[in-house]
Image (cartoon, helix red, strand yellow):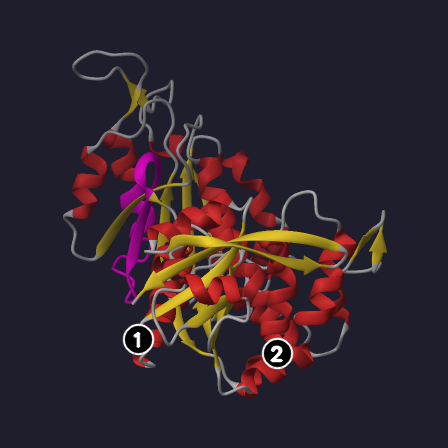
Amino acid sequence: MTARIDVVSIFPDYLAPLDLSLVGKARQRGLVDIAVHDLRAWTSDRHRTVDDTPFGGGAGMVMRPDVWGQALDAVLDPGGGARPSGRVLLVPTPAGEPFTQRIAEELAGVLADGGQIAVACGRYEGIDSRVTEHYAAHQDVQVREVSIGDYVLNGGEVAALVVIEAVVRLLPGVLGNAASVVEESHGADGLLEHPSYTQPPVWRGLEVPEILRSGDHGRIADWRRERAVERTARVRPDLLAAHPATVRAARKGDAEVLADLAAATFRLACPPDMSEEDMAAYVREHLTLERFRGYLRDKHRWLLLAEVAGAVVGYTMSIAGEPVDPEIAAAVPTRPTAELSKFYVRAALHRSGAASALMDATLATARERGLPGIWLGVHGQNERAKRFYRKHGFARLGGRTFTVGSRRESDDVMYRTL
């Protein structure tokens, strides 16, 4: 049985776009049967009246239940019986549940099994509430009232177009590349989609990221996943609630992702007036792929990675041993000790809980190694980072200087007893 969608409206011409693009092609190919009906065909007076004044008073008009009842009885039972795979009465309304990709998938499942969706496009102040109450009482009709956003339209036709396109494109055979459904925003993983690029490689001075031209499909997949998580954190952080951060020990094969992450996040620890040249010089000296391969082989170091939705978003590197600087060594109150040498999380994920999870795991690992304390250096101007460290039990011991490119910089040295 072919999937069927019926749309009832007082403005059937409004639904003409259903003949266009992928939905129109799906109709032509027989993948879905979409019929549009004029509600006024079920009126009985010469004025073809579909509305009346509301009981209890108030502005506007309400659409009559008797007219809607006759129309929906006709379209929901066109063959004299219930469709075996289910029937859905869908009512677009600002008072409905938010329409999401999950609902689109559920409705597509109804259609894919040969079911039917009837869309009731209300106007004015809406449809008499007894209509949905009546059909909700029918065991073989599922009523779904949905909203496409927190705003009000003149009628349900625009929302109907949105819902139908979102649903039909999920039906088997409608999209040429089925992978498009998997990789897009609000897909199975609940993330926004990664940025996309095409020819030319340089446009108005803006270049396509080098990694996308590298041919390294593993790194490209990682990059896309990281950008998807980053974009979701920046634009729709609420979606990350389903993806709490997890922390694990870095492995030999993580050197490449660590180097990429370190190069991208190092600037977060630098003062705003530091030049790109000086930052690049530090990255070339300390944060290269070969450096991280060496760090991972060093038995005195341990590196942890924070992941959100499968993407690496932060890392720490700790080094067991006494401070090289004698002033710091003299100030550290307990022995043995370790340095929390690097602690970075992508800026878009700073409020996601990833940093706290990473810090908790770092301190727990230090305790497991029998260390009574751990110290770190943070740039004196980085007040945001110092607030974070104080929140996690670090206190200032003193200061130190270090070199970044051609500049001498000063750190606050902070310590945490474990």
Q: Magenta region: which residues?
A: 72-97
Label 2 crowd (10 A; few <14 / some 14-19 / many >=20): many
Magenta stretch holds residue 406: no
Magenta stretch holds residue 75: yes
Identify the element where label 2 is drawn: helix
Whether residue 238 is situated above or below residue 214 in the rendered picture: above
Pinpoint residue 11: horizontal percent, then vertical percent.
48, 31
**How far separated are the C-alphas under marks 2 and 1?**
24 Å
Residue at 25 percent across and 38 percent down: it is 69
Cβ atoms at labels 2 and 1 below 8 Å apart: no
First-in-chain label (2 vs 1): 2
Q: Amino acid at mark 1?
A: Arg
Which of pointers 2 and 1 indicates the residue nearer the eye? Answer: 1
Res 367 label: 1
In this rendered view, identify the residue nearer to me: 283 or 418. Answer: 418
Residue at 63 percent across and 46 percent down: it is 271
Instruction: Locate the C terminus by quadrant.
Output: bottom left
Report if residue 183 is visible in the image.
Answer: yes
Pinpoint residue 15: horizontal percent, then vertical percent.
53, 40
Q: Amino acid at mark 2?
A: Phe
Say which residue label 2 marks: 292
> Viewed as shown, does residue 89 lie left or right of 171?
left
Residue at 61 percent across and 78 percent down: it is 292
